[in-house]
Every structure is written in C-alpha cells, then in structure tokens.
C-alpha cells in the first residue's frame, strides 16, 4: 500500500460524518458504499496549494482521492494525490502533493476511449454530488490540453467554467474539443 493510499484510508468517515455529508452537503450514499469510497474527512491545514494533516489546529475538511479504482471499482488501485476542501468553501481546495492535475482521471479515460462526452465540474463538491462521475481540473497552471487530449466533447457545469476552459485550450494553440454547457445551467440562467 502506498503512503498516500494509507493516508487516504486514515480519513475514512464515521457513520455520523457520512450522515452529515449526505444530509448537509447532498452527497449521495452510493459514493460511500460502492466499493471505493470517494471521500473522507480529516483535519488538515492548507499551505499554499497543498495541505498537510493537522489534527491539532487543522480545520475539518472533505478529502477525495485522485487515482484509479481497483477492478470492478472495488477499493483503490492507486492514489496518486488527494484534494481537500472545506465544506463552506468548495471552490477553494488544496492538493496533498500537487502531482495530479485532475480529479476523476477514470472518467477522462472512459470519455477518451469510448468517444463519449466528459462532464467537467467546477469544484470537488460538485464532483462528489455527481457520484464521482466526470472530472475537475485541479491545477490550471498546467495546460488542460495535456490531459484532455482526444476527448471529443466536454460538457461544463457552469458558463464560467466553459469560458475558462475555452480560454485555456485556445492558449495551448492545439485543436480543441467541442465545449458545451450543461442543460441544467441553461435552465437556471433562462
């Protein structure tokens, strides 16, 4: 077991924490009981773009692994990084090692290989609310084109994310995928 995987296991939520995440944050139950738990809870301190465990002074945070689930989505095959955020500010997150630029690598691979649209979320909480389906760009300082290459269609969950992605891909001066905005966003804006 890798060090990051061991650390992630230490963030396993208690029954009370699972109930709180389901009730307060609207995170579906199946992400806790589907074979590979998609989030945990721990006290961490943010230090720039990274976080460190801090059980004394750290703030309670939701922690999601970045990596690949095991066969049949049972357990985690690899945990290459983790992302932490505070429930009150899901748009502000930090990574453990900053090695993974994206959360939801499996969804990117599925979209790429099966030529199906990729749902891109604005933040890790929205990704969890979607049951871990889709992806979140964690590091905008690296070109998203590097890991979204060959994805033919990307559906963004907000107009702002669609614009940010379009701008980032245009700067890479490579062929870009078709970018769409989720129908739910269209209904909310109309």
Image (tube, rainbow, N blue to C red):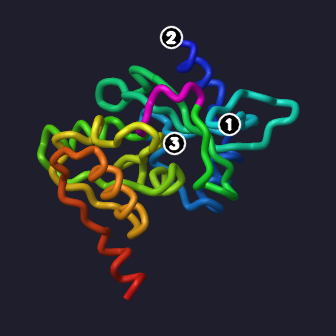
Q: Residue at x 57, y 13 (%)?
A: 3
- Tell me where residue 51 appears, x and y as whole percent: 67, 32
| Mark 2–mark 1 distance (CA, rounded to whole Å) | 27 Å
| Mark 3–mark 2 distance (CA, rounded to whole Å) | 20 Å
**On the image, which quarter does residue 103 sit in?**
top left
Instruction: Name the mark on residue 91.
Output: none
Label 3 close to label 2 by CB (< 8 Å): no
Q: Which residue is mark 1?
A: 48
Instruction: Name the mark on residue 1.
Output: 2
Magenta span covers which residues?
A: 96-102
Choose mark 3 or mark 1, whichever is in front.
1
In this view, the residue in front, 111 or 141, is 141
Choose mark 3 or mark 2, whichever is in front.
2
Query: Does the magenta segment cover residue 53?
Result: no
Determine the secondary structure under disc 1.
loop
Q: Earlier in the sequence, mark 3 or mark 1?
A: 3
Determine the secondary structure under disc 2.
loop
From this viewpoint, which residue is outermost toward the right?
56
Instruction: Name the mark on residue 32.
Output: 3
- Tell me where residue 176 appears, x and y as whole percent: 19, 51
Q: Earlier in the sequence, mark 3 or mark 2?
A: 2
């Amino acid at each position: 077991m890798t060090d990051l995987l061991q650390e992630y296991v230490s963030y396993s939520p208690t029954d009370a924490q699972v109930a709180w995440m389901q009730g307060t944050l609207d995170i579906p139950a199946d992400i806790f009981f589907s074979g590979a738990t998609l989030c945990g809870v721990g006290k961490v301190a943010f230090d720039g773009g990274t976080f460190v465990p801090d059980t004394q002074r750290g703030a309670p945070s939701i922690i999601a692994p970045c990596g690949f689930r095991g066969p049949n989505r049972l357990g985690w095959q690899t945990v290459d990084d983790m992302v932490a955020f505070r429930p009150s500010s899901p748009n502000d997150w930090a990574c453990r090692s900053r090695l993974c630029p994206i959360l939801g690598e499996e969804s990117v691979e599925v979209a790429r290989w099966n030529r199906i649209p990729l749902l891109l979320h604005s933040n890790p909480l929205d990704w969890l609310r979607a049951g871990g389906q889709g992806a979140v760009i964690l590091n905008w300082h690296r070109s998203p084109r590097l890991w979204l290459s060959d994805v033919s269609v990307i559906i963004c969950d907000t107009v702002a994310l669609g614009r940010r992605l379009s701008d980032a891909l245009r700067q890479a001066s490579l062929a870009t995928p078709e970018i769409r905005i989720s129908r739910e966003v269209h209904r909310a804006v109309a």
